[in-house]
Image (spheres, coloured by chain):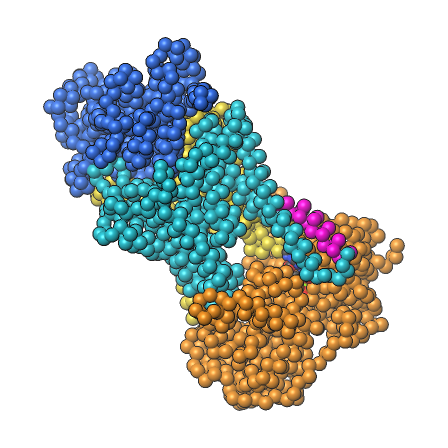
Amino acid sequence: MDEKVILKVENIWKVYPNGIVANKNVNFEVHKGEIHALIGENGAGKSTLMKILFGIEMPEEGRIILNGEEVKIENSKKAISLGIGMVHQHFMLVDSLTIAENIVLGNEPKKYGLFMNKAQMLKQAKECSEKYNFNINVGDKIEDVSVGVKQKTEILKALVRGAKVLILDEPTAVLTPQETKELFVELNTLKKQGHTIIFISHKLNEIMEICDRVTIMRHGTTVDTSFIKDTSPQDISNKMVGREIVLHVDKKPAKPGEVCLEARDIVYVNSIGKKALDGVNLKLRKGEILSVAGVEGNGQSELAAVLTGMIKPVGGSLKVLGKEIEEFEPAVLRKNKLTYIPEDRMTNGCAAKLSIIDNMFTDKIESFLKKNNVFIDKKKMKEQAEFLVKDFSVLCGSINHQVQMLSGGNIQKVVAARELTEDAEIIIAEQPTRGIDAGASELIRRKIVEFRDRGAAILLVSADLNEVLELSDSTIVMHNGKVNAYFKDTSKLTEEELGYYMLGVKKQTEKEVNAIL
Amino acid sequence: MSSVLESIFSTTFLFSVIRVATPLILASMGAVITSNAGITNIGIEGVMLVSALVGVFSSAFGFGPWFGFFMAIITGVICSLAIGYVSMSLKADSVLTCIAFNTMAIGGTVYFMYAVVKDKGTTIALQSGKLPSVEIPIIKDIPILGDILSNHNVVSYIAFLMIFVVYILLYKTPLGLRIRSAGKAPNALSSVGVSLLKTRYIALGVSGILGGMAGAFMSMGYVTWFSKNMTAGRGFIALAADAMGNSTPVGAALSSLLFAVAEALSYSLQITMIPPELVQMLPYLVTIIGLVAYAARKSSLDKKKRKKLAEQ
Amino acid sequence: MKTRKRMTVGQFNTWFEVLRFGLAIFIAFAISFIIMSFSTDSPFAAIGNLFIGPMTSVRRFSTVLETMIPLTFAGLAVNVMFKANQFNLAAEGALFMGALMSAIIAIYMPGPPIMVIIAGMIAAGIVGSLVCAIPGILKIKWNCSEMVISLMLNYVMLYFGTYIFNQVARDPDSAYKASYTFREGVNLGNIIPRTRLHAGIFIVAVFVILTYIFMFKTKWGYKLRVTGSNIHFAKCAGISVAGVIMSSQLIGGFIAGVGGSTEMLGMYSRFQWSSLPGYGFDGVILNILAKENPAYVPVAAFFVAYLRIGADYMYKQSDVAAEIVAIIEGLVIVLVAATAFLSKFRHKMTTKVSKNLLEAGGAR
Amino acid sequence: GTGKVQQNSKDQTETKAPAEEAAPAEEEVAESTEESVGAEKSAILIINGNLGDLGFFDSANAGMQRVKNELGLNIQVIETGDDESKWESALADAAEEDVDYVIAVSPSMVEPMQNIAPLYPEKKFLMMDNTVDFAGGDYSNVYCATFKQNEGSFLAGAVAATLAKNTGKLGFVGGMDIPPINDFLVGYIEGALAVNPDTKVIATYPGDYYDPAKGKEHGIVLINQGAEVLFAAAGPTGLGVIEAAVDADKYIIGVDSDQSAGYAANGDEKTANQIATSMLKNVGDAIFRAIDLDLKGQLSLGKSESLGIAEGGVGLAKNDVYNKILTDDEKKAIDDIQAKVVSGELKVSTAIGMTTEELDKLRSSVAP
Ligand SMILES: Nc1ncnc2c1ncn2[C@@H]1O[C@H](COP(=O)(O)OP(=O)(O)OP(=O)(O)O)[C@@H](O)[C@H]1O
Ligand SMILES: Nc1ncnc2c1ncn2[C@@H]1O[C@H](COP(=O)(O)OP(=O)(O)OP(=O)(O)O)[C@@H](O)[C@H]1O
Ligand SMILES: [Mg+2]
Ligand SMILES: [Mg+2]
């Protein structure tokens, strides 16, 4: 047995109830004290494999060897007791409880054998956060803290339980660049203290920056493991998808036309009473991609939600295609040829239990009716759905399968296929490629450019700076609920410059910002 | 009319409010525990019913009412766990499971009643005994208070004690922390290796204890026999009390008391010439109005708060 | 290759569902049989009577069909409301009020009986709609739990209906609580002599077909299904969800109301209900058995009605209380609704099927 | 065929009687069957509610036991529960059996009776406590008996007023606000007034026959209002009223059966002693009488009889408790009243056919 190897999985098979083989014959080795990246396309089975390691899913076959001994991980409790900790991609925190309560949950200090010992609890949580140099206030309630602090709480939860092997499933997806940097510092500290980290991400640059080795998964199996220093981003992505992919979107210069969406003085107050939007002005023109950049939580998602009618602003006006919008309702806006790719595809983007075909035309079912205007024309729907599935290369068994059977990227393709409709004049795309692999991202980006060239106006809300720089024609930056900067020509913009505005280090004058109008 | 007022402002009115509220408080505490754990337990109605029958049987064929009380609690726990097994381990929808269970409880109690006493109506043919009433030493001598508070059935005192116990359990113990987490963020609980299933089973078990007590009170405190479908929707009312009280023990208890006041009022109003059907409707109407008022207040407060913040 | 593999797993699943359903019924009967054998010396005879009971005479069999009618209506009503993801249990109150409304019309409205019947049904439907709309409105406006509200509302309806009944329709000369008798000829006729089977069976058949078409073939049904499946998505896609929720409650209530009037005009000649008929919960039960598909609702209703009539026969022939049927129903429902029931076996089989296919065909 | 007959009669001897009565009964059957006239005959009773009410239905059931024991018939008692949709088919089911008498005992069974009886002209139907519309159809195979519950309640009211020596207030709990229940109330009020014209009567209706807890609350409210003696006509709900009376140490008047004896038989002496008397509605006796008469060929089918005190249809349970708590003078006074009612000297009103206004007027006149 190799001394270095702390965790080893051999010949893991996992079949989901619907018959999809998510993991087939997976072999995977993690060395002690390394940061090991796991990367793979949509549906490659990374999450599934991690869930197996953390006892959430049971494999049908295969062995897990930890510290040279074969182990059976029946549940998370067992995993924790074996020193495995997992930070899931989605937060697993109780919002109404404090950080300390979240950290000690399941391991609560007691007094008189029956009651909570609050003092002891705070002490424990504090000691732990100090030990790993996590700068947080453990008495705060989760609902009041930032995403970064939540992520730290998640990691502390694992560490306080003595995790030696830490699984991080796409931990940076929701973090700002600054927070990501901070996290990386902390991960390096952990590494120095002897912890082993498995790091899942779709972002190659992060993997190149922090990881020691990388394992690539494709179609349910591990295809390759190599040292980061011996490989290159190009190499990794080739192995991931098994073909050359174009990392850059080719696009012709924009030809902006008339204004088709105009927002004035939009104000929105969120549920905890913060002014999430504080007098936002913007104009969107035909044939251009305007991107909205910004550090998460500065009002971009609220802006998208207001412009699509998902939430109602407390002040301001909106003009679409020259018409004043009285009612902020998705139905009204959609009637005005506005479509929307929402950020949260599972909540707002699809009905997971309905079939793919039923999810394809939800917004335009009225145009799939028979002559009497009551009955649905199933035949027309089927033809069109089959066409779109091909056009967007949605990987599925049949268009009658439930959407929930698809992997994340393919669900996103279904959403995009629905929203990128022929007669759409305004497209609001919110994080359209978040959390999906390069191949699918490229397809969606290409489609967006295609629609721009056809004369649609596109508002791209994205936290991915590469995407902003590559895809958009002009850019606005949001900071603290206000538009902080407007750049008419994105191609003249650099990543650093954008960062300054996003963090509020730099700020344009009102006149410069209002140049958009 | 004056006699109605007289009766409402009498000590006996408040006395009967407490009695009417007893099964509701117990059952609503059960509902509070389960809804905190993230389970909508409309099966509490059936749990009460089955416990009431088992209580009577055990009392009649066993060692008297306290044994019956004990067995009713055991039954409550077993029934609740059975609901849990089906809805959690066998993964059936919890509302559907509860509806199925209630159906089984209504029919099943009649089936067993018939099998034992050859009646489908009541078990009055059995001598099942009654849980005692208790005089509270000092309080009983205080003029008005004594008349209201003393000499209730022992289960009434247990019910009020349970409000306190449930409060402590939910907010001051590790188990309470887990139960609340199970309801608010089940993923969070499993992510730290605490079994969500186990936590919810425990919550259901505790609610079974409370439901069992409520059932025992119906058949061995309120009256001394079981009669077909004798809970008559009290479990549903408990659920409404839980909703009205925002799933807090004190809130749910106050809501139960509100219903009990309306119910007691409906008994007193019967002596007027107001049509009895309208009077009987009162408690349910009050509950609906209470639920709506609570929800409306919540949403208007929310709106106001936002408006105010926007103006700042 | 790919399509063949999907089909095979799909075929296995269909086969498995049938097996599971059968097994659920078998287990329910087995458990009930054990329970019965404690209280009777001849459990075999008892369970035999349960099965053959409804077949022992034309009249008994027609009783099954009669019982099926209100059950099916309730099942459809609940189906439409549940499909919009609203756990509205007010079908019970709607059925009661619908029955009362049509009874009042049948007593007082002049004109040819057929007109009276049609007017009665429509009025009953409207009343049913109003009843079921209440939880819907409160849900939309203030986000009140429709389940809790409807549970309370049913009692309000019982007492309110009884009040109306007393004021308007009660026959003071009757020696029991009953309305005046309906006008001559105001009933749904009789299809088979010496039974009570009435033309309501055709009405319910029409409603099953209409509900099915509505749900799966029309734009409204489509919007309803999307809303029920994911309300946020429906809203985002421009569906007016409040309208859909409201209309689903109105339609469900309408069906329940018509169900009440069909039962009233088909089976009785005067209104004499003094308690809630209990169809609201039955409707939920039927939906589980019918896998939430309106087309299967009558099948489920037949099954339940057959059991209940069989149980009555069994009780009459032996000393086993008919209420055992509640236990059988409950167990069947629980096992059918229990998605994890037999899941281990299913998983093992799926794994085997998938792996075999994989080895045989290669690609995923 | 004969096989079926035999099997049926064998089945039907396994009656659905309360357990404690069953054992001695069986032996008697064995000896009496031989010589009894009714040996080959059988009867089915439909209880369109549930047994265990210690009242009306239990009384009917007791009558059936007498029919079995004394007349030697095979009997069967079917409880249908309160699901109205089942009543008619239960009646038809019974009529389809190889049976001679089909018996229904509650007012609300009249409609099914009218629908079913003409379809089975070879069977004899007994309808208790209500009458079919003999003018409206061919019901030559139906015998109906109604009970003058107002007459019996008159006596109950008289006893109650006699016992209410302090406040003169009486309480009444009726299952529902409906004519047959109000018939009890009307008689009760008039009987009480006959003894003491200043008597006050408070009436309440829980609106439910199966919620004893509610019944108890109603009883308590009445007692709190100063009612000294209670009277409940409310099925199992009424049992809760009895509990309230017992808890408060008040007298209550039982209904339909001798409820004091019922409790005593169950071993509950304390309750038995609080039930001053019971207003008997001898439905069981009426069933027995009808079948007995028919076996002798004397029953006039196709007719309805109204059974009052004179016919033994209603009356008071003058049992030990009654004898103990009433003085001889008081008992004599009650007997006098009873004689006057029988002779027609005292006229008792009935709520059947009374308008709501008339009833309200009567109720208001005695309201405290
Ligand atoms: N609950 C499930 N039921 C059925 N199939 C599932 C389920 N979860 C995942 N799958 C399938 O298993 C395969 C692997 O999924 P998994 O989520 O592990 O992939 P992934 O590598 O995380 O991909 P992505 O990057 O798209 O999230 C996919 O094809 C997916 O469709
Ligand atoms: N056994 C299972 N039962 C139910 N749901 C499952 C099961 N296994 C996985 N899932 C769900 O399937 C989904 C697919 O996994 P995953 O989260 O990796 O995909 P994703 O959301 O497409 O992409 P990413 O994780 O890269 O953002 C998850 O939402 C997970 O909760
Ligand atoms: Mg993943
Ligand atoms: Mg994934």
Q: Is residue B263 left or right of residue A189?
A: left
Q: Which chain is yellow?
A: B
Q: Is residue C350 magenta?
A: yes
Q: Which chain is cyan?
A: C
Q: Position of residue B307 (x, y in %)?
A: 43, 71
User: What colour do you see for chain A?
Assistant: orange
- C182 or A340: which is nearer to us? C182
| Position of the C terminus of chain B by quadrant | bottom left
- A502 or A410: which is nearer to us? A410
Task: Give the overall secondary structure of the magenta segment.
Answer: helix
Q: Does residue C198 lie above or below C50 as drawn? A: below
Q: Is residue C195 left or right of residue A186?
A: left
For the magenta stretch, what is the residue range? C341-359
- Residue at 75% from the left image edge and 53% from the top image edge: C356
- Residue at 54% from the left image edge and 44% from the top image edge: C334
Q: Does residue A374 lie above or below D349 as drawn? A: below
- D181 or C60: which is nearer to us? C60
- C173 or B89: which is nearer to us? C173
Which of the 4 image quadrants contains residue D57?
top left
Q: Position of residue C245 (x, y in %)?
A: 44, 61
Is any part of residue C282 visible from this angle?
Answer: yes
Q: Does residue C293 lie above or below A255 as drawn? A: above
| Position of the N terminus of chain B by quadrant | top left
Q: Is residue A27 magenta?
A: no
